[in-house]
Amino acid sequence: MKKEVYLSLMFSTVLAVGCNMKEKTNVDNLDLSNIDTTIVAGDDFYDYATKGWQLKNPLKGEYARFGTFDLLRNENQEKLKSLVENLLNTTNANGTPAQKVADFYKAGLDSMRLNEEGIAPIKEYIEYLDTISDSKDIPVMVAELFRRGIYPFFSLYVDADAKNSSIYILNLGQGGLSIGQKDYYLEDNDMMNQIREKYKSYIKNMFLLAGFNQERADKAVDNILSLETQLAKASKSQSELRDPDANYNKFSTEDFEKRYPSLSFADFLSAAKAPEVKSLNVGQPEFFDEVEKIVSSTPVDKIKDYLIINIISSSSPYLSDAIYNEYFDFFGKTLSGKTEQQPRWKRALTTTDGALGEVLGELYVQKYFPAEAKQRMLELVGNLQQALGQRITNLEWMGDDTKKKALEKLATFTIKIGYPDKWRDYSALTISSEDSYLNMVARSNEFDWDYAMADVDKPVDKQKWYMTPQTVNAYYNPSTNEICFPAAILQPPFFYLEGDDPINYGAIGVVIGHEMTHGFDDQGRKFDKDGNLNEWWTEEDSKRFEQRSSVLADQFDSIVVINDVHANGNFTLGENIADQGGLMVAHTALENALEKSGKKDELLSGLNYNQRFLLAYAALWAGNVRDEEIIRLTKVDPHSLGRWRVNGTLPNIPFFYEAFSVTPENKMFKNPDKRVIIW
């Protein structure tokens, strides 16, 4: 299920923090060995600040990208592994959460059983699908696949109604592309042509592994690529999908069925065991026009091949080595450049965590999240909230009426720290060691589907969390106007209790400021304090915001990420605004703290507070990444690559120039009239 929140990948962590750290020492927790002084800071601050880290942490085969975030994630996986393995060594009563976790994880580890079963766990589904002879049966089949966590043709999720945020509504959106993004189907260059050729080989090999003959496999290649290309041509670009107004198209059920009769929506909902709905939101109606055309006029055999590859691909991680190896060869090696699979225990743990997240979350919090961390984190969030309020008040480009409403929105932020107050009940989820691993995953997906569908047309539960406590990440949700920091992100190595304020504000402080700024980025700003999509800006202020935003978008458009591939400034605009805002807000909060403590002129390891703040920020994004992953992320990830979250953002930041003596002779220098600060 898709939930649209603004994620902040690879962000830092905290254990305990307040406005001024009471337990500081002169120990320098800024790793100076990461700095490469042979590089001029004003020419390439990313390499200056992180080259040492890059050399100490070369990419291993299982990673397409590895950074400081991944170090924390690895540490977190070891903690979860310890928790799960303790359950394996315990006698657990049938039906208990512990039994479900233990049996799920064991099934993922049992390679001998998976290899013996081969294609058997999905054979019944494929054979059933292959008997379909009438296109009228397609919507029912698609609905059954949705329940199992397989999403051909389009996406479906439950979220707050964007214009009535107190009620959940069913949302439909474009989807159905196996490679994940339209450019992979439509761009005509050597790289994309090679990827499509490898995708053809992948389809053919998977059909052969599934027991189909050579003729059928060859035919499936043409059928699937043709149908997915048709979907790709009808799909909006990643930048176009960032417009919440364009993505709000509310239909009555009756009007939806009239416009898309071949989708047999009533039959679809019934087969999906979803409630009847009076209305729904269709994100991209023109895309569904194409889906209607495909279902109504495409030969059934062509659609069946498309559904079969969806079944095989979605199931591959839970089947035999032969099948998963083929899956990894395309999605891991070709698309991302990985050379090795993750160890089986990591894959099994990730799947178990996805299925039983809050069960593991409760265990995780009990062992690894100190009670005092929550209160201290709230104190720091309060400091950043105050700093953002100061910045809004002092904006020269925004009028008083819009400022007043912006401050009201800021004041009504809901702040979630650590873990939910009420844990989710998993008693309705049956996990049996007699089931295949794939069937366990399918049962979990059905359980999650039913959980989501139960919310349709019901009041929004503002206490619900959209990440588990053990998730190393954070988010802003515009429909509830909330920022959330799960427990796993509230820990070292990015925050040090004995460290000085510049490090803490440059790391976790920027993370918090980033999430707050999402409430005022190019998407978040369109939602009011109650979470409704509503124009609360004056027309003049909207124009000023858009003018400044377009400058930032153009700056990132000009970045060449590799070869002749450019960054996408419009696609990454929200995250770039939030990065810039996070820096500015955290820096304001830092200066408030240093004024209060009287330590603004204090040096540590010969570095002043601005230098240490910026080095701590750059350290968040230290990492190595493969060329294939650079290209893939540029097309699918709304975050800029780590290098450009530093080198693309800092040229606009005023105190960067003074801190590292950046002059017009330096490569990162930007003329003052070309710089832009939004928040």
Image (cartoon, rainbow, N blue to C red):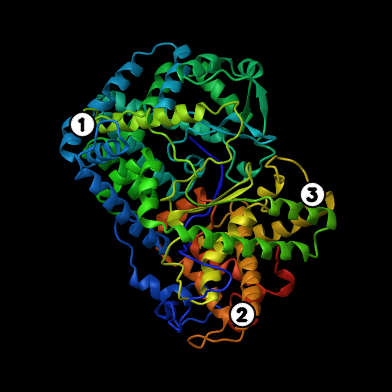
Tell me where residue 10 appears, x and y as whole percent.
Answer: 47, 58
Q: In this view of the protein, which residue sits in the foreground, 186 or 620?
A: 620
Residue under label 3: 537
Give the mark nearest the N terminus, 3 or 1.
1
Residue 99 to residue 665: above or below: above
Decide: marks 3, 1 in contact (CB < 8 A)?
no
Which quarter of the figure has residue 511?
Answer: bottom right
The residue where tag 2 is placed is 597
Determine the residue positioned at 41% across, 54% down.
628
Q: Secondary structure at mark 2?
A: helix
Disc assigned to residue 177: none
Mark 2 or mark 1: name the one nearer the start of the chain: 1
Judge whether residue 221 can be spotted in this image. no
Q: Position of residue 9 (x, y in %)?
A: 49, 55
Element on which disc 3 rests: loop
Q: Find numbered disc 1 in the image and state the secondary structure of the residue it sits on.
A: loop
Q: Which picture quadrant has residue 97?
A: top left
Q: Is residue 81 visible?
A: yes
Residue displayed at 15% across by 32% down: 116
Q: For the residue marked with disc 3, what is the amino acid? A: Trp
Mark 2 vs 3, N-terminal side: 3
Task: Answer whether labels 2 and 3 touch (C-beta < 8 Å).
Answer: no
Q: Nearer the viewer, residue 231 or 118?
A: 118
Q: Position of residue 344 (x, y in %)?
A: 24, 47
Which amino acid, by three-letter code, is at mark 1? Gly
In the picture of the structure, the residue carrying the numbered disc 1 is 118
